[in-house]
Amino acid sequence: MTRETFDRRSVLEMSLALASVLALAKSALNSDLVFAQDASVVPTPSPDQQAAVPAFTTDNVKATAKKLAESEYVKPTVELPPPFDKLSYDQYRDIRFRRENALWHGDKLDFELQPFPMGWLYDAPVALWIVEGGQPRQLVADGKLFSIGPLIGTGPEAAPFGFSGFRIHGPINRADYFDEYVVFQGASYLRAVGRKQAYGASARGLALNTARPGGEEFPMFRSFWIEKPQSGASEVVVHALLDSPSTTGAYKYVIKPGEATVMDVEATLYPRKVLTHVGIAPLTSMFFHGPADQRPMTDFRPSVHDSEGLAMWNGSGERLWRPLTNPKTLQVSAFLDKDPKGFGLWQRDRAFASFQDLEARYERRPSVWVEPKGAWGEGYIELIEIPVDDEIHDNIVAYWKPKVNLEPGVEHSHAYRLHWSEHVPASWSGARVAKTRIGHSKTPETFLFVIDLTGSAVEDVRDLPVADVSASTGEVTNVVVQRNPEITGLRVSFELKPDGADLVELRFVLKAQDQAVSESWLYRWTKP
């Protein structure tokens, strides 16, 4: 594990800027099939243009991305008349989709699609194509699909002039009601939930230069092709064209909703320039506070977070658990690996008592797990933790960073599966960390760590395992392993004396006869 450091002033500036951008994302060019002369403006297709569109295949998106990468990036725009050019949050929410016009409504499918309008933060038009029988048809954003509320007033028939994304509904919770369970909106962001869950962590198509000097680049999905499912289908297929100043890309999402909503993802990148710091399969979440965090809070709620830890299953088969924190300064951690088996942001705690929030219901937030397909080679999983003072900000980012740069003129492909569920699907017979707690010890300038573990490996064991605890600096004392009957598991506690250090890397694993019987617990202690 390595740590990357930056100038403190630049760190603070980057952390504030990145947290702001991620918060906006929380609260994409038209395709090569129908190009306008001015590629920065998405046109309304004429009937002749629509008729001239060739049959759609996955290779169309790749060909479009590859061709687009040969030219300079131009952000798509649409000239919006007042007041649509400066909508407030409340005004934007007053543009409502007419539910009776949902795509495939009444077609006896388990899928319906509702587009989002442009406006407020979403100022770049996104081209939406519906593919039926292999033939693509572009949707037009106008008053037939949306109603304009009183906060805006009467608008022209063409309003709201463009799309910013879409959402998918289906009978995921009840057979007689279509609930929303997938959203694509804002840059390359997407969110999903499984059965009886509420939105929390997000995924992205790509992360570029996250928490790096010079600022992060946010690629966008500028065109989507959504295939109409066949009767009786259990999945829907979404294709996306990604574009940014540094790269283009072709993406395919095969989405299957259920108790766990699962997405098979194929991502192919065509860089315009050398990509020196690229994040594959990026995840974004929020951690405000909890018992594993040292920042003092006056919140009545014991914990406030969408995810509580980064789980990893590395190429050598080791399971790792890194509790998340809301640090005092920006923290960047890198976990070296080769051909990772999986990683994700996990919300392990499912008890209402741990959050006490009747509105947010953090105990229902999904865990998101990335399951790589094929060998991803050498690189590292990078975790970024950004200091925030409000839970509205997404301040956690995690992704796979390849060791080698991605060069232009070459096709770069990664395939993986995204799981949105209560639990990570990777089977594991060893013990898992159920909760990490930190407090001050009775000894001055010493900190107490208390870690609870559960699982079949520690249930009713005759002989207690040994806790192998190590620290990069400072002194670890009073290591204790005891039974915790309240969780039918074990509790490990120890004290850390930093000895003046500002940062200490901690690690422990339970061992029985020198064999690991738990995941490896990792923690970065920083001076409060």
Image: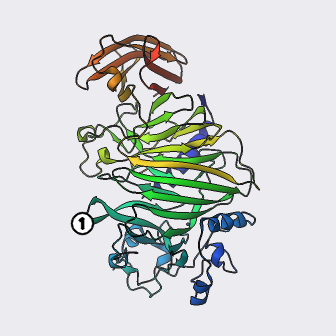
- 178 left or right of 236? left
* The image quarter in which residue 399 lies: top right
Location of residue 101 with respect to 513 vertically, above or below: below
Question: Which x, y percent locates residue 134?
Answer: 54, 74
The residue nearer to you, when weighing 196 against 110, is: 110
User: Callout 1, which amino acid?
Assistant: Asp
Q: Secondary structure at mark 1?
A: loop
Please name the residue shown 47% across and 71% down the image: 119
Which residue is found at the position 30% from the left and 15% from the top? 461
Residue at x 33% of width, y 78% of height: 100
Question: On the image, numbered disc 1 is attached to which residue?
Answer: 176
Whether residue 176 is visible here, answered yes or no, is: yes
Give the tally of numbered discs: 1
Q: Is residue 504 left or right of residue 40?
A: left
Q: Quadrant of the C terminus?
A: top left
Asked whether residue 396 is in view, the answer is no
**Residue 330 higher or lower than 488, as above or below:** below
Name the spot of residue 336 as percent of width and height, x first: 60, 31
Residue 256 occupies quadrant: bottom left
Q: Residue 57, percent across and down?
A: 60, 69
Residue 1 to residue 59: above or below = above
